[in-house]
Amino acid sequence: MARYADTLLTEGEFVVLRTRQHWLALIGRARVGVALFLGGLLLLFLIAYFNVAPGTLRDILSGIALIMLALGVIVFLYRLWIWWAQDYMVTNRRLLKVTGVLNKRSADSSLEKINDAVLAQSMLGRIFNYGDLEILTAAEQETIRVQAAEEYPFESCGVILSRGAERQLLRCRNAQNELHARDPVRHPRDARTAYYIDPKDLLRIGDLERQGFDVAVIYHSHVDAGAYFSATDKQNALMNGEPFYPAATYVVVSVMEGKVADIRAFVWTPAARDFVECPM
């Protein structure tokens, strides 16, 4: 029986690679079910271990344990169903992603439009052979480049958020000049050497996160400087030594005399405890 994704193929198009997310992604999304199931088993073990006397208390505890076991199985099977319904396909023409069980959602990008792909793997990812693959389309990179050139001689900034197959690029406003004008002692840099995403844009990002979007890419430009992840960039990306968005890719654009000279990507690497450049 053909899967739904196969019905989307055009004449002369064939599948080169078909896959789905790593099984650890399933465990992560089904963690509530797994926790309920293990909690139910633990409760049954404790009932037997402490030899709870037959009666009302034992019946209540046993009932709670059985409910936890049943809910755990139901949640896990539901997540398994969603995971199994996924299709990530590379054809001879495009990259195709299909999600959804009853209501299907599909998204694709022709191979010609894919400009950069960033693969980030943690130490655990290398052991179990999984990682985060972030694709930056030519259209997205062009938007980032145009914004960086337009906002010269000030730094530009923005984010790309993703939810399943959906992606949204938010071109944000750099409010660093306002902070500098209000309190130059606390904010000695202006927008030529720093950026601060406008609070209104931060609210928009927060709204999208509450709708299930994840921050996939955070980008900004450097004015008349190289495309490197500076000490200030690192400081702003961390809280108590840990990244705000550990799975995000940080893109830095170098703008020299109003023209984009370079663009590079960086990801957080737990083993190095630092942001490391990754190929684009």
Image (cartoon, rainbow, N blue to C red):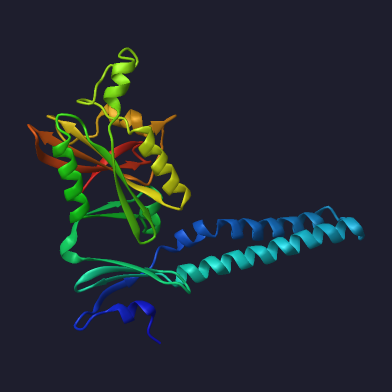
Seen in the picture, residue 36 relative to 183 is either above or below; the reply is below
Residue 106 visible at all: yes
Residue 218 visible at all: no
**Nearer to us in this view, 235 or 204:** 204
Seen in the picture, residue 227 relative to 82 is either above or below; the reply is above
Residue 208 falls left or right of residue 115: right
**Nearer to us in this view, 52 or 205:** 205
Q: Measured from the top left, where is residue 167 in percent x and y?
A: 33, 55
Q: Measured from the top left, where is residue 155 in percent x and y?
A: 21, 32
Residue under the point 59% across and 56% down: 32
Residue 37 falls left or right of residue 250: right
Q: Measured from the top left, where is residue 103 in percent x and y?
A: 45, 72
Q: Indicate the quadrant containing the N terminus: top left, top right, bottom left or bottom right.
A: bottom left
**Nearer to us in this view, 110 or 267:** 110
Residue 56 falls left or right of residue 242: right
Residue under the point 91% across and 58% down: 56
